[in-house]
Amino acid sequence: MRLIDADEFQKQIAGMAILNNYPPNKANALCELVDNQPTVFDVENVVSDLEQLKLDGACDYKGCADCQYLDKCWDGDMSEEHAIDMAIEIVKRGGLDES
């Protein structure tokens, strides 16, 4: 999977339609198809989750119940590593729900 700029893609569809004398309704249908694709990366949610992680701190963001650092973590000594791991998971999730 890769991310594309949907707006730029739609401009290219319109340009190709004009250049090749394709019927406008065909280009419009393709642009509508692009618009209806699901979002795979929500920048606003990723930023929001990262900001919340920053505010809460790694140990309070989602709790420590399943923390891999729990047995090594005292007084936050491993909190930087924990926070970075959590940030990586947020980015991998793409701002989408964890489900």
Image (tube, helix red, strand yellow):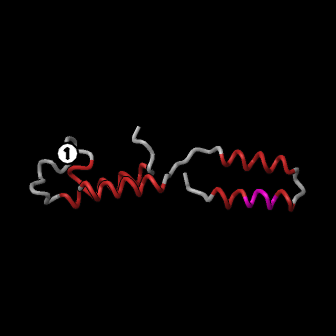
* SS assignment for the magenta stretch, majority: helix
x then y, percent, for residue 21: 90, 56
**Quadrant (top left/top right/bottom left/bottom right) for the C terminus:** top left
x then y, percent, for residue 13: 76, 56
The residue depicted at 35 percent of the width and 57 percent of the height is 50
In the image: residue 7, left or right of residue 84? right
Furthest residue in direction left, as rendered: 74
Please name the residue that numbered disc 1 is placed on.
64
The residue depicted at 50 percent of the width and 52 percent of the height is 41
Please provide the residue range marked out in magenta. Answer: 11-16
x then y, percent, for residue 65: 20, 41
* Secondary structure of residue under mark 1: loop
Q: Nearer the viewer, residue 72 or 41?
A: 41
Residue 78 among magenta residues = no
Amino acid type, residue under disc 1 in the picture: Cys
In the image: residue 91, left or right of residue 22? left
